[in-house]
Structure formats: structure tokens, C-alpha cells
Amino acid sequence: MSNTKYILGSFADPDEMMHGIDKLQANNISIYDCFTPMPIHGIEAKLGVKPSRLPIAAFCFGALGTVLGFSLLYYTMAHDWPMNIGGKPSLPLPNFVPVTFEVTILLCALGMVATFFFRNHLFPGRAPRVMDLRASDDRFIIAIDAHENADHALIESLLKDAGAVEVKYNERKYVSYE
Amino acid sequence: MSSHNESILREPLVTGKDITYAKVTDDILLPVENKPNKAWWIGFIVAALGAMLWVVSVGYTFWTGIGAWGLNKTVGWAWDITDFVWWVGIGHAGTLISAVLLLFRQNWRNSINRSAEAMTIFAVICAATYVVAHMGRPWLAYWIFPLPNQFGSLWVNFNSPLVWDAFAISTYFTVSLVFWYCGLLPDIASVRDRATGLKQKIYSVLSFGWNGSVKTWQRFEIVSLILAGISTPLVLSVHTIVSMDFATSVIPGWHTTIFPPYFVAGAIFSGFAMVQTLLLILRKVMNFENYITMFHIESMNKIIMVTGSIVGVAYLTELFIAWYSGSEYEMYAFANRVAGPYAWAYWAMMTCNVISPQLFWFKKIRTSIPISWVLSIVVNIGMWFERFVIIVTSLHRDYLPSSWAMFYPTWVDVGIFVGSIGLFFTLFLLFLRFLPGIAIAEVKLLLKSASLQQKTKLVQEGAFPDEQVKFFQNSLDKYDSVSEEDIKALDVRK
């Protein structure tokens, strides 16, 4: 038992997992993380996970796109080499709308997704840090740090009461490295 | 999450018995984890032959120049731009399903968004090939982008809709690809965690190390929502700009302010028809009948009917405005469309796009799989003719009667078009073979709210009044994946 690093409560049903979180929290047992095959709505509030700031990043990248897109148009059309094209003004603002808009969308999307990948350490070839291989299939996993929470018997009984189909004592943090 | 139950008046989005989370994964990954069946191989070989025809035709065009096409000095744009607009339009439905329906919280999108987005990406690839091919000197394609160069620097003309189009299409392709791939990450992780050996290694690289933790899912949902929010104006802008390729010119029949909304409606119309064409086959061959149900088919047919009606109104408005404008050239352009040498194309367009979708007012027709499939192809033919009519009939009789001409396609024109359909299906079949064709995680979200199994359980527990259950039972009649027994099971009360 002493080598156990993480205790995993494996649930077959998301509602039972939420119930398990409530029970653990009522007994002051801290939860390391949960791994689920689909997004669970309301779990962030329960675990005290702060709202994501990605919308702010998306807005900043979008604003950057607007500035860069417009600057490109201004520089090429009005500053670097103004040309008489069919007698049109060299700073035709309505004609600048489509390209400025497209560059805004492009930078907003790419910047936001890049931020998401960077913050979550997602990139091609990253070794998957998976605690239970069925968490991407049909199991809803609550992971509990075994060193921080000493009373393993209590944890097991709480998880089982809540409806866990299996309780695992993992000596390695990530099983996916094998 | 199931703190409240979905109304029984809503039709189920997932049917079938003993549907569990594990069964959803098994069902959807079946084509990915096993060797493909005969139907896949036949489809793939036919499609690959088409793609080879495309390579030959495009290669021939690059070698000899666009003189290989049937163009002449009067009709300088014909099948290439027709096919380009057709493909871009088809792509629009994927974004509409994944973005607009997400913003409107339409849960039926969950099981069709993945394949529709894949369709978008492959359709835009097909469209982009025409842009490059019709340039004549494709090795100079990069001239469309504002790159520093040794001519001065001489920049591109940002007053030109063709330059806007390059920006719009490349942004659209990039954003669609990013949206599609982000959605794929959790499902690729599902394949990875069940695979072994080399397959596991490949899917591990592709999965970007996805692990499904709370924070990952939280950010994933935010990213999906914002991408949907920015894709919606993007998709409208793309076909608006495509229509401006024509609308900002001074050619009678092109120079109309109705083009942007009319093109966008037409794009959604043809795109949904293509989604219908693909999904009706897909659900049968891949055994996805429980996930892509009659409700999905009927809903898409309703959208085809609505957008078809919008397109019909646009055709009539064009005719009215041509007459009302009093402009001699405008009136002639439309008289020539209706009764000139290309009248057969005009009336083919009118029949396929305006009359045939009206058949979907009949419930029998819009819930019939064979008829829906045939009509979806009819709509796609009609939408091809729409672009052909707009482009060729406006050009072939211009201001100088001495230069009036007809357009006759060569084998290269035909080869590129038929070949691009082959290319599209080749890419689509490869996608079905190697990536999950339905968004697994998103379908799992529906199991405890919108599945027939869950609704049956609640009915049997007596959660709903009898007249609502009766209504629900009647709505199940049209489902081909629901048996008589399933409907009778709703009469049982515990």
C-alpha cells in the first residue's frame, strides 16, 4: 500500500462520479483530477476549477489580426506604392473590409487554438499522460493523490458507496508509458 | 447533468437497445479498427480511378496551358469557375452544421458534424485546385498573395474581389481544418487507448497527448464555442466574396446586389444535399443507423426545402429586377437565359432547384430514404447548372453581337470535373477508414438525455402523461431503426 501513488475510482456513469466527488469532498479528501470520455457539465464548479481565460486570448488575437490586416492594406495600397487603379482612391476603406475581416478571423482562430494547445501541453508526439486507459472509452475516473490523503480504506469505501465499479491503487502515475 | 429530463415530445437522437458508452465507442470505431469491407473497396477503387483521371486532366492542362479547355475569347470563364463555385458551395454545409447548429444548441448535429466537416475540407481542396488550374501558369500562383517581390515591390490589388477571394478561401480552409482537428483529438485518443503496437504509436502522435482531464475538456468546450462563433460570419463572408467575383463586374446578369444572400442560400442548399447524399450511404454501409436516424434525415430535408425556396425566390427576384430595371442589356441577358440557346440549362436548373425540393412538403417523401437520396443528387445537379447558367449565359452573348459564341467543353474540362468528384470521394473514403466518422464524445453526451433507451426507461417509470407518450410513439413510426417491439415497450408501466 505504501507504494501507491494514486487511487483511482472508476465509474460507469457520470452522475455516480459526480456523486462520488460530493462524498469525497464532504470528507475533506482532495481530488487530484478527473478523466472522462466526454465533457461533464458542472464539474468545474464542483472541483473549484476557475473559468477559462481563453476568450480573452481569442479577443486579443482577433484584435491583433484587425490591426495587422489593416496595416498590411494601408502599407501596400496607400503608403508603399499608391497606384491609380481605375481612378479609385488609394485608401478605399470599404474595399479594405473583406481582407481585414478575414485576417481577423484567421488570427483569432489560430491564436486561440495555439494558446489552448500551449496551456494544455498538446502537441504532436507528446506522450499521453493517461492514468486509466478506459477513461477515453466508457469509464469516468476520479484520481486521488495517495500521499496527501492517508486514509485509503475510507477513500475506497466512499468511492464504492457512490457506485464505483472498480478502485485501483496505481504505483505509477501514468499507465500509458508502458 | 441529467438533473432534468428532456421532453418526451422530442424525437430520440440515438436509437437501439443496450446502448452503453462502451457500445458507442465499439460501433463507431468498427470501421477504423477492422479491415474495410467489400463496399468500401469497391467505392475506393472507383473513386481512385476518378482521382487518376483528375491527375491526367490537370497534368495535361498544366502541360499545354488552358487552351486545352473549350474556352474562346468570348467565353473566358466556364466549367472551371462553375466547378469552383459548386465545390465551395458544397463545403458550406459542413461549417453550417458544425458552427451554426452548435450556436443554436441543435443536438442533432452531434452525430453528423464530423463527416460534414470532413466533407467541407475535401470540397474546399477540390475548389482550390480549380483556382490554381485556371491561372494558366500555376507555378506563379503565389502572386495572388502580397509577398515582397522584385518588381518594385509591386503589391496585389486589394480592390479586387479575386484577391479577397484568395484570402477568404485560404482562411476558410485553415479555420475549418483547425476546427475539425480539435474536435477529432478526443476521438483519436479513444482509438489510441484501444490500439496496440505501431497503430497505437501513430494515433498517439495524432492525438497530441490528449488525456480528457477536467481542464482539457473545459478549454475544449470554450475553443469549440468560439470557433463556432467566428466560423459563422466567416462562412457567410466566404460565399459573399465568391459572389462578389461576379457582382462587382459590369456584366449583365452578374452585376446584381442580390448575389451575396442568394449565393449563401444556394451554398447551404447544395451543401446539405451533398451531406444527404453521403450520409444516406454512410449510415447503411457503416451500420450507423442508430446514430444517424430518420430524424436527422428529415431535418436535413427540411433545411434543403427552406433553402431551396429561398433560392427559388432569388431566381424570380432576378427576373423581376431585370424587367423592372428597364436596362436593355439586363433584360436581354435574362431573356437569353430563359429562351436563348442555353434555355435547356436554365430550365434544368429551375426544375432541379425550385420544383424538386418542394416535394419535401410531403412527409412520405422526406422520410423515404431512396427518394431523399435521388432528390439530393437532383439538387446537386441543379446547383451545378445554376453556376453554369450564371457564368456562361452571361458571357456568351456580350455587348458586341459579332463576337457572340457558344461554349463546348473538351474532354479535359469533363475530365477535371469528373476527376474532382473522384478526388473528393477518395479523400472521404480514406477519412472513413482511418478516423472516427462520428464524433464519439459528442454522441456520448446524448445517451442520458436524448436516446430512445433513456426515454423508454423514463416512460416505463411513468414520468410522462399518456397523451405525450402517444405522440412520441407516433413520431417513432418513421424510424427505420426502431422496431414494432420498441414502440410497444412504451406501453409498459412499472
Image (tube, rainbow, N blue to C red):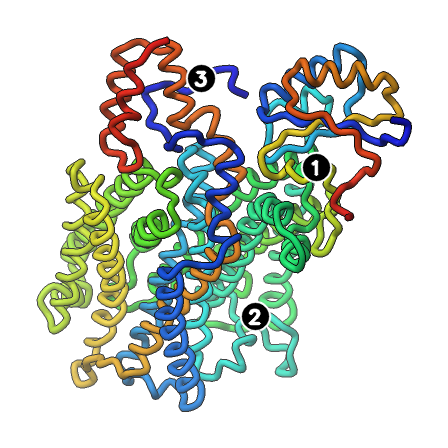
In this rendering, the label closer to the viewer, 2 or 3: 3
**Farthest right residue in view:** A2
Is B317 rendered above or below residue A141? Answer: below
Secondary structure state at the residue bearing disc 1: loop
Instruction: Report the front residue among B437 and A135.
Output: A135
Q: Mark 3 lies on which chain?
A: B
- Real-space Cα distance between discs 2 and 1? 48 Å
What type is the residue that disc 3 sits on?
A: Asn
- Real-space Cα distance between discs 2 and 3? 53 Å
In this orientation, does residue B268 appear?
Answer: no
Q: Which mark is residue B145?
A: 2
Q: Position of residue B261 (x, y in %)?
A: 33, 49
Quadrant in which the N terminus of chain B is drawn: top right
* Residue at 8% in and 67% down: B339
**Farthest left residue in view:** B339
- Residue indicated by mark 3: B5
Identify the image quadrant of residue A160: top right
Quadrant in which the C terminus of chain B is drawn: top left
- Check chain identity for marks 1 and 3: say if they share one: no
Dot placed on the residue nearer the N-terminal end, 2 or 3: 3
Q: Which mark is residue A113?
A: none
What type is the residue that disc 1 sits on?
A: Asp
In this orientation, does residue B84 appear?
Answer: yes
Q: Which chain carries label 1?
A: A
Secondary structure state at the residue bearing disc 2: loop
- Residue indicated by mark 1: A132
* Residue at 29% in and 77% down: B414
What type is the residue that disc 2 sits on?
A: Phe
